[in-house]
Amino acid sequence: METHTALFHALADPARLRIVAAMKSGECAVGDLVERMDIHQSGVSRHLRILAEAGIVRMRPEGQKRLYSLRKEAFDQLETWVAGYRRHWEARLDRFGAALEHRQATSDNSTKESS
């Protein structure tokens, strides 16, 4: 659960979420993100550090540049977490649907018997 908390905490900030969205198309240099985000370079770097610490992005040095990309593993963890809740709600909705069908069938039978 601690891993999920770090992921959600990192993604909870609107600026970091925008940075992640900007990186969906592929690897980005810090300068590219600065231009897209309208945030100073120091702010983008701080957000990238937080995202890296949470395991959401990885950095690859290329000469003087630092190139950042999304880490699939972080999103796999989020998908696993969501899938657990999805299974929970699908099971509850299946039971609810079965109860409604049973109630409808019981209601239909009692209506036929009273006619």
Image (tube, rainbow, N blue to C red):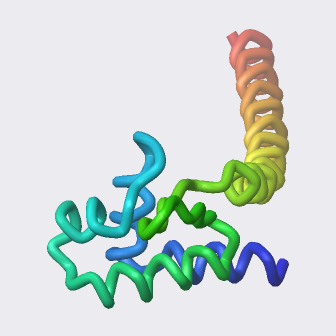
Residue extending farthest front: 63
Of residue 14 and residue 89, the one placed in the foreground of this image is 14
Percent across and percent down for residue 115 are 68, 10
- For image coordinates 55% across by 84% down, the residue present is 50
> For the N terminus, which image quadrant?
bottom right
- For image coordinates 34% across by 79% down, the residue present is 44
On screen, residue 114 versus residue 32, left or right, reads: right
- For image coordinates 44% across by 60% down, the residue present is 20
In the displayed structure, would residue 73 be above or below residue 94?
below
- For image coordinates 74% across by 73% down, the residue present is 4
Rendering quarter of residue 40 = bottom left
| Camera sees residue 47 | yes
On screen, residue 91 versus residue 31, left or right, reads: right
Of residue 14 and residue 38, the one placed in the foreground of this image is 38
In the displayed structure, would residue 2 be above or below residue 66?
below
The number of callouts visible is 0
Percent across and percent down for residue 18 are 34, 64
